[in-house]
Amino acid sequence: MADFPFADRLAALPPYLFAGIDKAKAAVAARGVDIISLGIGDPDMPTPDFIIEALHEAARKPANHQYPSYVGMLSFRQAVADWYGRRFGVSLDAAEEVVTLIGSKEGIAHFPMAFINPGDLALVCTPNYPVYNVAVNFAGGEVEYVPLTDENDFLPDLDAISEASWTRAKMIFVNYPNNPTAATASKEFYRKLVDRARETGTIVLNDAAYTEMYFDPADKPCSILEVPGAKDVAIEFHSLSKTFNMTGWRIGMAVGNPSLVKGLGKIKENVDSGAFQAVQEAGIAALAQGEPLVDGFRKVYRERRDAICAALSKIGISHRVPKASVFVWAKVPQGFTSAEFCTSVLERTGVVVTPGNGFGAPGEGYFRISLTVPTPRLEEAVSRIASL
Ligand code: MLT
């Protein structure tokens, strides 16, 4: 059988981080090891029943069996606009400023195709969700990485980006609450970013998928769109995945500047045929009625965070106590690289954690723990790591 070579854009890619981890995990599991998977941020709690009921009902409607709208049902987009109004005090025009996505990953991956020409520059704050740089490369663009460091609370130093880069950059990717570092951004930070982007005509793409996973109401994350003038330059990506335990459902949204929303919609018209309407109807139910349950999920994550942070401190693993997200970003012990540490943790203890360098060079020296297993398993994972 012929073995066709991949196109350059694919051949140049490293294996997708979580696909590589899945493979290594499967090899250890095949030896009969009891695996504790703290790799991917995939909520273990089930989707609430009322959302499943809404899907059930919607799936029976023949109208939902036909092609959906490319940019999403107006009723879903209106539910998103209403939620943004209630949650962030941001007013959105559902018809012009909201697009439905087949999960935020899909939208983020397609967005650069609408605005990046070959050779254009994009600034990517790193360590980062790997989709950002890959999407820019797929569109033919160049990436300049902006390091996120502990000293700077994992926020980009906007003044350290050269004038030439600001002027040349078509877009900048930011992500708060941050994956993988779990850092959060203040409104002040967003204000400075928006002001700079307006001066230089740079698009700001904010990935806000984790805003609802906060542990204390005093630390409630904000939306970039809360900042005056943000709609001039920003598009924010959000998702029902983490908030409502719906990763498998593939439903998300992008909101903000109407021309940015329109450009993404044009790409989607050409590459997909929209999200299943029954899933969008279930999404409407989630957005409209889900908040009391999300409060319960937050309490579970908070308990897990407290337990794992206490356990890590006990064994001398340095980490920041996160205020939001479903991750803890910790330092690998002396004498290991990130990859060496995570490989030996998996091989010798059956615990899956993600090497920080998998999110980019500044992630070297760190590893990421996902809070998506029950507390006793998290504690068991740390005691196994302690036995290394
Ligand atoms: C992660 O673990 O980084 C995320 O769950 C991956 C994703 O959202 O696709």
Image (tube, rainbow, N blue to C red):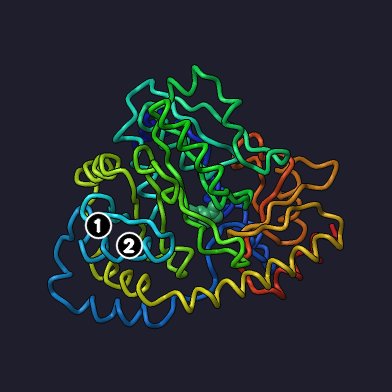
| Three-letter code for the amino acid on which mark 2 is drawn | Val
Determine which residue is flagged by label 2: 80
Q: Position of residue 331 (x, y in %)?
A: 76, 47
Q: Position of residue 24 (x, y in %)?
A: 62, 52
Q: Position of residue 247 (x, y in %)?
A: 44, 63
Residue 154 is left or right of residue 84, and the answer is right
**Closer-to-camera residue (378/91):** 91
In the rendered view, tell whether residue 67 sits above or below residue 301. Answer: above
Q: Secondary structure at mark 1?
A: loop
Determine which residue is flagged by label 1: 94
Give the total number of marks visible in the rendering. 2
Residue 231 quadrant: top left
Residue 224 is left or right of residue 312, and the answer is left
Q: Secondary structure at mark 2?
A: helix
Q: Are marks 2 and 1 in contact (CB under 8 Å)?
A: yes
Question: At x 52% / y 41%, what residue is drawn?
Answer: 15
The quadrant of the rendering that contains the N terminus is: top left
**Closer-to-camera residue (4/35):** 35
| Three-letter code for the amino acid on which mark 1 is drawn | Ala
Label 2 crowding class (10 Å Cα cut-off): few <14, some 14-19, many 20+?
A: many
Question: At x 45% / y 37%, what residue is drawn?
Answer: 194
Label 1 crowding class (10 Å Cα cut-off): few <14, some 14-19, many 20+?
A: some
